[in-house]
Image: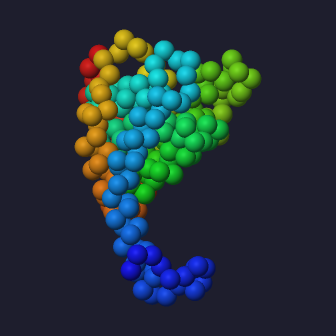
């Protein structure tokens, strides 16, 4: 069987959908590789900063690792701006959607909201609300997002910082996206893990 028999989904039978499920499961095994390729593609994304978008992503993840962050934080930080290519107006939501089945809820929520929290640094210069993050005041992950932005995001545009290469993070990305999607032992709604387990190594 090379392809399904149906031309409309309602006409499919069990054999068709068993066939498709097998193909889809096999295809998902390449998710990490596709994401790493897309990450490299950030070099063709938004310009004007002193580092490329790929450089920013790598620098953010490097800072997270040097702060002693766990694998969920590091991979989420690495991919937090991956939506810049295809979803420039909601890149944070785009990235969070990719991450949500595979990382702790804490991390995907922070990635989803980081765009609003970043406004505190530049909103007043572009006619936007620098206090937009206050909409989330009282949320269990509010402080985590503020810390994420302060320590790993807003300061990761430094061309002189000793940023680790993408190859350093490949195994971590592979590990995260090899997980069972939506595994409750991974997602752990309401759970919080510290962003920093040690002082940053400058």
Query: Where residue 7 sits in the image (x, y, percent)?
Result: 58, 79
Q: Quadrant of residue 9?
A: bottom right
Query: Where residue 64 sits in the image (x, y, percent)?
Result: 34, 31
Query: Where residue 193 sits in the image (x, y, percent)?
Result: 35, 44
Above or below 155: residue 140: below
Above or below 163: residue 92: below
Determine the residue positioned at 29% across, 48% down.
174
Residue sitting farthest toward the top: 160
Above or below 175: residue 89: above
Any part of residue 72 in sight: yes
Any part of residue 145 in sight: no
Residue 178 left/right relative to 84: left
Determine the residue positioned at 39% across, 41% down.
37
- The quadrant the C terminus occupies is top left
Determine the residue positioned at 25% across, 43% down.
171
Determine the residue positioned at 53% across, 30% down.
45
Residues 199 and 95: in front is 95
- Identify the coloring: rainbow
Residues 112 and 141: in front is 112
Residue sitting farthest toward the right: 127
Q: How many marks?
A: 0
- The quadrant the N terminus occupies is bottom left
Residue sitting farthest toward the front: 2
């Amino acid at each position: 069987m090379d392809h399904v028999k149906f031309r409309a989904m309602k006409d499919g039978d069990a054999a068709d959908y068993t066939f498709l499920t097998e193909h889809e499961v096999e295809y998902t095994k390449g998710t990490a590789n596709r994401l790493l390729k897309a990450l490299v593609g950030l070099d063709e994304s938004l310009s004007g900063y002193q580092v490329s978008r790929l450089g920013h992503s790598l620098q953010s993840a490097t800072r997270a690792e040097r702060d002693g962050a766990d694998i969920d934080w590091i991979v989420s930080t690495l991919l937090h701006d991956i939506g810049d290519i295809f979803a420039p107006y909601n890149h944070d939501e785009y990235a969070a959607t990719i991450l949500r089945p595979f990382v702790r809820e804490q991390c995907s929520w922070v990635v989803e909201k980081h765009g609003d929290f970043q406004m505190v640094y530049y909103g007043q210069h572009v006619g936007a609300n620098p206090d937009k993050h206050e909409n989330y005041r009282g949320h269990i992950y509010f402080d985590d997002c503020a810390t994420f932005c302060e320590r790993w995001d807003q300061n990761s545009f430094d061309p002189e910082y000793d940023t680790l290469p993408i190859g350093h993070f490949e195994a971590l990305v592979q590990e995260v996206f090899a997980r069972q999607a939506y595994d409750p032992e991974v997602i752990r709604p309401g759970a919080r893990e510290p962003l920093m387990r040690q002082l940053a190594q400058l």
